[in-house]
Image (cartoon, grey):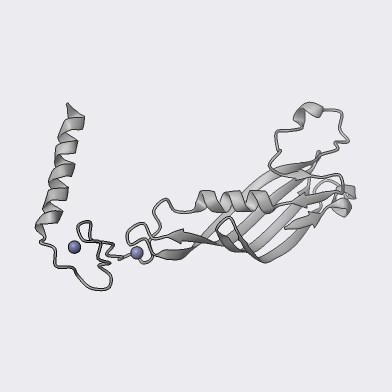
């Protein structure tokens, strides 16, 4: 996800270039990334707009099975050249997430990966109806029900209820 922007930086404000991304990553739990990137020349740099669908490796929060999570997200950030032509150096550093280096290459890898991990659900599920693991015997209840007395579930609830009482006082 490195784009040479030499040409775009020479173009007038408002010029626009679009790119299609389809890459296998295999790093930081991110398996693949697909989507569209639009770069628009702004006064001081380039506005980057990404619309991405990523496949991220995760673990089902109920049965702990490894799963692939598909996450879709879009973001927009301005990127400034690391060598600024403008005298206003105070602007520099605000957008250090997305910088254009000396060879005028814009590297989107970091930003796209960070947003993918941020968009990951906190509790991913292998299936919306995943039955999870029995808290008493560890049986994967998606395969077959365990023999534990259902009483164990009641105990869990009573614990929660007493916790609720404690937090109120
Ligand atoms: Zn599951
Ligand atoms: Zn059980």
Image x and y of residue 159, in percent? 16, 43
Q: Looking at the image, in which quadrant does ligand 1 appear?
A: bottom left
Q: Position of residue 113 (x, y in %)?
A: 61, 53
x and y percentages locating residue 99 in the rendered image:
76, 43
Would residue 15 appear left or right of 67 to someone viewing this image? right
**Residue 116 or residue 87, whichever sits in front:** 116
Residue 160, located in which quarter of the rendered image?
A: top left
Q: Quick check: 101 left or right of 118?
A: right
Residue at the spot 58% in from the left edge and 55% down from the top edge:
28
Residue at image coords 28%, 62%: 132
Q: Quadrant of the C terminus?
A: top left
Q: Nearer the viewer, residue 112 or 38?
A: 112
164 horizontally vs 54: left or right: left
Q: Please, is residue 156 above or below residue 94 in the view?
A: below
In which quadrant will I find the N terminus? bottom right
The correct choice, above or below, for 84 with respect to 114 in the image is above
Indicate the position of residue 137 as horizontal and vertical percent values: 21, 61
Looking at this view, is 25 or 147 the one in front?
147
> Could you tell me which residue is drawn at 9 percent across and 56 percent down?
151
Does residue 66 lie above or below 76 as drawn?
below
Count the marks.
0
């Amino acid at each position: 996800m490195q784009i040479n922007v030499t040409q775009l930086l020479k173009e007038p404000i408002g010029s626009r270039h679009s790119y299609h991304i389809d890459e296998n990553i295999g790093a930081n739990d991110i398996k693949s990334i697909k989507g569209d990137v639009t770069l628009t020349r702004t006064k001081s740099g380039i506005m980057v707009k990404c619309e991405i669908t990523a496949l991220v490796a995760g673990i089902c929060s109920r049965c702990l099975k490894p799963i692939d999570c598909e996450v879709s997200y879009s973001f927009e950030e301005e990127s400034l050249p690391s060598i600024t032509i403008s005298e206003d150096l105070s602007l520099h550093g605000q957008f250090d997430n997305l910088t254009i280096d000396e060879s005028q290459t814009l590297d989107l890898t970091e930003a796209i990966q960070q947003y993918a991990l941020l968009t990951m659900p906190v509790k991913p599920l292998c299936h919306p109806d995943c039955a999870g693991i029995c808290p008493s015997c560890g049986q994967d209840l998606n395969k077959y029900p365990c023999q534990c007395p259902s009483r164990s579930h009641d105990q869990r609830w009573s614990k929660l209820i007493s916790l609720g009482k404690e937090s109120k006082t």
